Amino acid sequence: MAEIVRPSRRPRAKHIGIVACSAEGAALCYRTLCAEAPGHLGEDFHPEVTMHTYPLGEYMRFVRAGDWDGVARLMLGSVEKLVRVGAEVLICPDNTVHQAFDLVVRDSPVPWLHIAEVVAAEAVERGYRRVGVLGTRYLMEGPVYTSRLGARDLESCVPTEEERSRIDEIIFGELVKGRFIAAARAYFGGVIARLAERGCDSVALACTEIPLLVSQEDAVLPVLDSTRLLARAALRVATR
């Protein structure tokens, strides 16, 4: 009599939906989910993952105009598609568009994780008090991190205006296009060193492409990698 092959009894994981914006950061988030999931679910297993994104240019049209309602509509368009195929928890591996987060969550049928809240929780866990924030100009000059860090009694600090402008140029001129250059890495290292001189005890890599350029070895401060921290938080939620 032929042996009956039964499916393995693995704990059920929630279906993770990724509302993507820029390709490189979203890809790093997806790879982290798949690479680290076996620690939760067993070898070669990860939660079901679905990703949807509109072109980055569509997002930037609204971001540059300060039209966060327009950003929210794009994100909700992705939400609709992801929920239709079964997503049960949602993340967005893009820090800048989280300025529209509250508008999105209000109309989302499934729960979300907020990338800055995940970073803030990690900063508290590690005992940090003053966090330097690196990201796009829109992110560094906006409320996403100041609000979430402040809610946990953490101080935030951003680079100078000149540094913010150069960082923004590197992100949009190089990183989102998959170009990771030594000169840019050295520049970020210098900015981080100056944040340390201003009293920061850690630095948030609050653009999801920055961790592809800057590692802990490149920074004099402990780094908070928003991309990988978000992926790990989603894994914990999906597998508990």
Image (tube, helix red, strand yellow):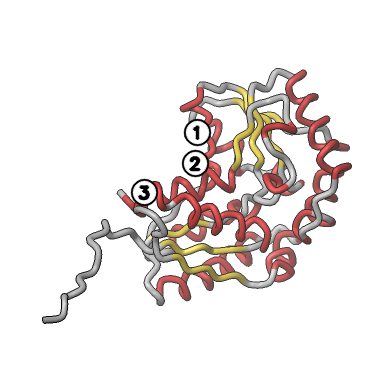
**Which tag, 3 or 1, sits closer to the chain's start?**
3
Q: 10 Å neighbourhood of mark 3: few (<14), some, or many (≥20)? A: some
Q: Which residue does the numbered mark 1 point to in the structure image?
A: 122
Tell me the SS state at disc 3. Answer: helix
> Residue 16: horizontal and vertical position, in percent?
42, 61
Q: Is residue 156 above or below residue 11?
A: above
**Which tag, 3 or 2, sits closer to the chain's start?**
3
Residue found 60% across the figure and 44% down from its top = 144
* Kind of residue sitting beneath label 1: Glu
Q: 10 Å neighbourhood of mark 1: few (<14), some, or many (≥20)? A: some
As measured in the structure, the alpha-carbon distance from the residue carrying label 2 to the one carrying label 1 is: 6 Å
**Which of 129/29 is in front?**
29
Q: Is residue 210 above or below residue 58?
A: above
> Residue 226: horizontal and vertical position, in percent?
59, 43
Q: Do the residues under discs 2 and 1 have CB atoms within 8 angstroms?
A: yes
**Which of 232/129 is in front?**
232
> So how many labels did they put on this image?
3
As measured in the structure, the alpha-carbon distance from the residue carrying label 3 to the one carrying label 2 is: 19 Å
The part of the image, by quadrant, that contains residue 54 is: bottom right
* Kind of residue sitting beneath label 3: His
> Residue 128: horizontal and vertical position, in percent?
56, 23
Residue found 27% across the figure and 59% down from its top = 10
